[in-house]
Image: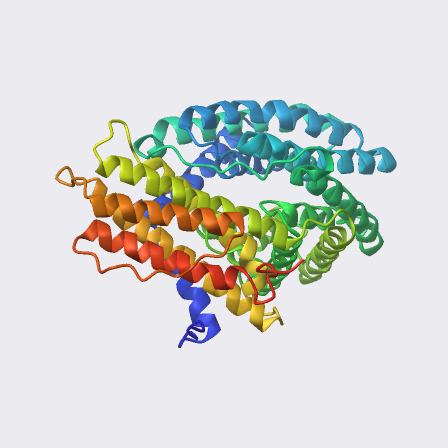
Amino acid sequence: MPPRTPTNPRGRYVLKRVFLAPDPGRIRLRFAARAVLGIGLAVVVCALAGHSLTGAVTGGLAALLALFTVTDPTVRGQALTTALLPAAGLPVLAAAALLHDHPVARDLAFLAVVGLGVYARRWGPRGHSLGVFAFMMYFAAQFLQARTEQLAEVSASVLLSVLTAAAVRFGLWCYERRLPPAVVPPPPAGTGLARVTTRQAIQATTGAGFALVMGQLVSGQRWYWAVGATWWVFVNTTSRGETLVRGFRRVLGTVIGIGLALFVAVPAHGDGPLTALIVAVSVFGIFYTAAVSYTWMMLWVTVLAAMLYGLLGVLTPGLLALRLVETGVGALGAALAVALVLPVTTHSVTDAWIQRALRCVHACTAQTAARLAGTAGADPAPTVAELEQLLARVRLSVAPLVHPLNPMLGRKRRARRVLGLLDDCAREIRGLVAVAGDPEASHDARLAAACQRVEAAVEALTGGRDLAARTAPAGTGPALAHLHGLERALAELAAPLRAPSGSPLVGA
């Protein structure tokens, strides 16, 4: 069945996706509101400590990163990672300040920070957070032209701001304590150059080198924008296709953000209260839209950057145009790097995530069957949470195939079909687990047989074997109905996962 064409125009669809996207428990709303509070308090603390505008901006950025990038699955882990941020960022900040007047050493150190920051992702969410924080401290030193004589002040601002952000996040408003621990799927395994993070570290360093050289040819003062664009294109991506799509979305968000900044940031130049209001709205927008639209997040990042340049007294329409050019240079550097340097194909990453999602379906079914059979300790809830995270990764890896600019219509249809059927599997699993959670649910021989058929279907799909479609009898209870729905979805998955010639979903 071909995918349905939305009746709304594309623009209305994007607006609905951002502002009407599901927000269970109002997590995104609380995430964004807490960020405004935490960053605002951090800036106030820096101001009360007598720090200059440069120190306050550095502190605000440190608080933003502490509230945005730390994503450990437990609150305890988040607190530990937050405490480690200054240890990762302050040495880098000091190096950037000390090397400010030594361009060659400064640039080589920047590339080293890029490579090590990406490579740190091999250690999971904590490595990712520390790598991002270290990179952004070096970037901030270029942004603010920090020098050795300012090092003590900006370091104090970072410490005060991280402490303030931690007090807000873990003391004043720690809504995560009432939530189950997040499930974070580990990245694809591998050693040496087979490890994705190793390849990405080399790619990011190469792309950043290109961006640094070309960015300096464009502007001797704002070249670091190009390096920053290359870096952020690589964040939260794995394959060549994901990186290219993210680069496109970064440029698109920057274009729209510059258009908005011309209407709000330039007129607000010099108006303190209006600037503070727009900065707060921009921070809220970054945090609220990050989970649903990278384009919208970049729009707000661009407006925020424009407001900060307004505070520093250098904002002009020409500067905004230069930011767009440098962003394009950075995105081009990332595109060349992922295409030419140790490329990680979309197929290999997508196939790995789909395989893991299907195996999780297998585990969910087995745990649910054991729960229905009365096995003590059987709990499918953790595997359901893991399945949701794995499906999010599948959507991210398949995004290049379903992108409107993808000219391969056949593969686009197949990718959409796979996503739809995997969503069907998840829906049936959630319904099945809800039934299994009923204390009155009891064992039924038909349930055991249906679970075995589901497990066999998953084994066939993940093992590359043919899967014969079965016509399951109509279920007489909710558990059987969900299991039969799961069987049908798995049977229908066999066709789009393999082309008629036996080729994979996305090709080599």
Quadrant where the N terminus sits is bottom left
Kindly indicate the quadrant of the structure image that contains residue 138.
top right
Is 210 on the left-hand or right-hand side of 295? right
Quadrant where the C terminus sits is bottom right
Q: Position of residue 500 (x, y in %)?
A: 57, 67
Q: Position of residue 256 (x, y in %)?
A: 57, 64
**Vertical placement of residue 470 versus 437, above or below:** below
Is 250 on the left-hand or right-hand side of 439? right
Is 119 on the left-hand or right-hand side of 451? right
Q: Position of residue 292 (x, y in %)?
A: 46, 54
Nearest the viewer among 465 and 259 is 465
Residue positioned 26% across, 50% down in the render: 431
**Vertical placement of residue 429 versus 96, above or below:** below
**Vertical placement of residue 170 versus 26, above or below:** above
Nearest the viewer among 201 and 71 is 201
Nearest the viewer among 306 and 446 is 446
Image colouring: rainbow
Q: Position of residue 359 (x, y in %)?
A: 45, 43
**Res. 69 in view:** yes
Residue positioned 16% across, 56% down in the render: 476
Nearest the viewer among 222 and 1 is 1
Residue furthest to the left in view is 440
Residue positioned 44% across, 35% down in the render: 38
Is 87 on the left-hand or right-hand side of 360? right
Residue positioned 41% across, 51% down in the render: 457
**Res. 153 in view:** no
Number of marks in the image?
A: 0
